[in-house]
Amino acid sequence: MVECIRCGKEAVVELRYCKEDLCQYCFKELFEKRVWKANKDFSLVTRGDRIVVGVSGGKDSSALLFVLHKMAKKIGDVEIIPVLVNEGIEGYRNKAIEKARELCEKLGYELNIVSYKETVGFSMDEVMKVRGPNGHKSCTYCGVFRKNGLNQAALDFKANKLAIGHNADDTSQTFLMNLLRNETHRITKFGSQTSEEEGLVKRIKPLIYCLEKECAWYCEAAELPYYLGECPYANESFRGESKEFLNELEEKYPGVKFNLLHSFLSIQEELKKNPVEEKPFLKCASCGNPCAGVKCKKCEFVEELTSKKNASKS
């Protein structure tokens, strides 16, 4: 029997990057301490917060909701509102919704659901049929529509913060993708939280110090319901290839993901000392939401898809 390095009980988790074997209890404690450390480092959750939590039924958001539930009780005067965005992917999201609803019922929350069909007029299955050979990759549409749906839900609920389940893997992948695309100007725009802008609810990422696989381990240790299925459209994404690349590196060189994460955080901190003047947000000519150009990406994509749909009918 492999013993837990901290308490001597049977170990169930091996953390190769720090050469520690942990039992179920000690691992749960470590995971939650990392979330509390993120909260201390970045002041993510404070008394008086009204937080919309983006849930999906997957491991990351299930871990996020449960940890924030415990954190809210300890901090006091923090309201949690779970919101799930239903993309409309038959055979995938409907299964995840069941797990998300099960977890919410277990914790005493009502699960609020918004859908692409309601917010943009197209389900994701319809987007894939309509986009055509010259359309964008699936994750490009999905990322924009999901972000818009969650932000609008947070505005509707009058939340001052929007918590999403992005973990250490997500952050290191995004950082790598920005470097590979020569989009270094984006480095200051993501991280543990976003800056406050009119019309955009501040997004926070309490799981920034937690690895993706550890979110699944935490769900198992805490006996949380979650759905482990993969999105059927994810094979198109550049992120998917970056994820696979980093997973292979992590297998050979344990700790590389955390190294990349902390490199990103160090660079971001240095950039904050000498900030580059950024152009202020404009208002989308169609919906009025904040955007960088004449129209926001959501409206651009909806107009594009509507045009293609109408053209196919004529």
Image (tube, rainbow, N blue to C red):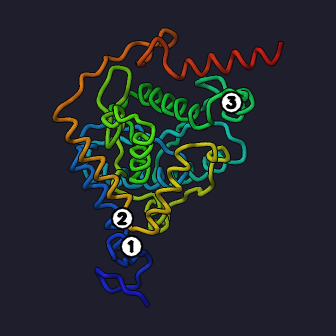
List the residue tagged with mark 2. Answer: 255
Please tell me in which quadrant of the rendered image residue 205 appears: top left
Residue 160 has which mark?
none
Where disc 1 sits, the SS reads loop
Q: Quadrant of the N terminus?
A: bottom left
Cα–Cα span, label 1 and label 2: 8 Å
Which residue is at a point 37% across and 73% down the rendered structure image? 25
Tag 3 and tag 2, C-beta contact below 8 Å: no
Indicate the position of residue 272 as horizontal and vertical percent values: 20, 35
Q: Kindly identify the amino acid type of the residue bearing the numbered disc 1.
A: Arg
Q: Using the rendered image of the protein, determine whether residue 165 is visible from the camera's viewpoint.
A: no
N-term mark: 1 or 2 = 1
187 or 203, nearer to the observer: 187
- Asked whether disc 1 touches disc 3, contact meaning CB atoms under 8 Å apart, the reply is no
Query: Residue at label 3?
Result: 127
Vertical position of residue 53 compared to residue 33: above or below: above
With respect to residue 231, does 178 lie above or below? above
Q: Earlier in the sequence, mark 3 or mark 2?
A: 3
- Determine whether 302 is above or below 262 in the image: above
Q: How many neighbours does mark 2 have within 10 angstroms: few (below 14), some (14-19), or many (20 or more)?
A: some
The residue wearing badge 1 is 16
Q: Amino acid at mark 3?
A: Val
